[in-house]
Image (cartoon, rainbow, N blue to C red):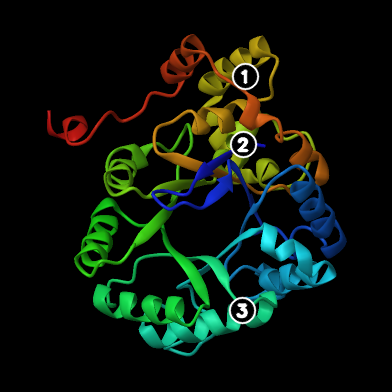
Amino acid sequence: MKYRQLGRSALKVSELCLGTMNFGPQTSEPDSFAILDAAVDAGINFIDTANQYGGRLGVGATETLLGRWLAKDPARRDRLVLATKVHEPMSDDVNDRGLSARHIQAACEASLRRLGVDHIDLYQMHHIDRTAPIEEIWQAMDRLIAQGKITYVGSSNFPGWAIARANEKAGAAQRLGLVSEQSLYNLIERRAELEVIPACQAYGVGVITWSPLAGGLLAGPASEGAGRRASEDALTSAAAREAQLARFHALCDQLGQSPSAVALAWLLHQPGITATIIGPRSLHQLSSVLHVPALALLKETLARIEDIFPGCGPAPEAYAW
């Protein structure tokens, strides 16, 4: 496993971040525990979750599952960078959502209880809250940092302007500010290159990519007969990109690598990227990509991938002229 600094912080995280959204609703607790054990054994030290994850089991179920896994071996907690999120609705209560100072404080306390830990390493805002003044948000985050309940603050699904605003406010108050942004970014969805990634690079914010396989579209044909790749929407999307995906699969065959591995490796070759989230539903899916950090793509290969999946180009030139 290889490690990178999380943005301008001194914290080092594995290039592969274990995403846990499937744990509980899609992957059973024993299988989830086996994946977590194998990931840690492979050197992954970065685990990402969210307070809302739980699907049919209810919000908070995934954090609770992680808490039971952590309790099995309390010593492992100190070796891990544990990240969770706040913003999404946790109940029907009008105040049990968003980024008010009140909700941030209450949601953090609830996440700590479910996870069974005394602090969260990276506390991420799951989405922007247009009703919450940035001063109120930093007031809440500063309090949690002072209380020792969180260590770093990150964002997720933020536009470039919100990243800039948050860190300008933080910098004016001599705070560290955001150290990471978790963003949708993959070979098919590259709009983050226009404003989000440049903003992150300018402010020393590390980018953690989610949906690196475009919901399974970049993983190749659905071989297991289940999951998102076998859904009607996924099959329709794959059919619409049949020629493009065929070119990509042919390139991967020439490289002797799976489409999933190449798509993940491509992300780790892009400027500003700290880590990419993998969300395996099985041990096989995990083991099939553990070699990705060691997979070096030649300039020629990167150029061929760029030809298959062209990006938007730099902003503002991409849309101004």
Label 3: which secondary element = helix
Q: CA distance from mark 1 to mark 3?
A: 43 Å
Dot 2 alpha-carbon crowd within 10 angstroms: few under 14, some 14 to 19, many 20 or more: some
Looking at the image, tell me whether mark 1 or mark 2 is earlier in sequence order.
2
> Up-down: is 225 above or below 269?
below
Q: Amino acid at mark 2?
A: Lys
Looking at the image, tell me whether mark 2 or mark 3 is earlier in sequence order.
2
Dot 1 alpha-carbon crowd within 10 angstroms: few under 14, some 14 to 19, many 20 or more: many
Give the x, y percent position of residue 133: 25, 77
> Up-down: is 87 above or below 194?
below
Q: Amino acid at mark 1?
A: His
176 vs 249, nearest the viewer: 176
* Residue 79 picture quarter: bottom right
Give the x, y percent position of residue 259: 64, 26
Q: Residue at x 54, y 40 (%)?
A: 214
Residue carrying label 2: 2
Asked whether, in this view, residue 3 is left or right of residue 25, the answer is left
Looking at the image, tell me whether mark 1 or mark 3 is earlier in sequence order.
3
Residue carrying label 1: 249
* Residue 30 picture quarter: bottom right
Q: Residue at x 70, y 78 (%)?
A: 116
Res. 125 visible in picture = no
Label 2 near label 1: C-beta < 8 Å? no
Label 1: which secondary element = helix
Residue carrying label 3: 112
Asked whether, in this view, residue 26 is left or right of residue 264, the answer is right
Dot label at residue 85: none
> Up-down: is 155 above or below 87?
above
Give the x, y percent position of residue 196: 32, 46
Image quarter of the C terminus: top left
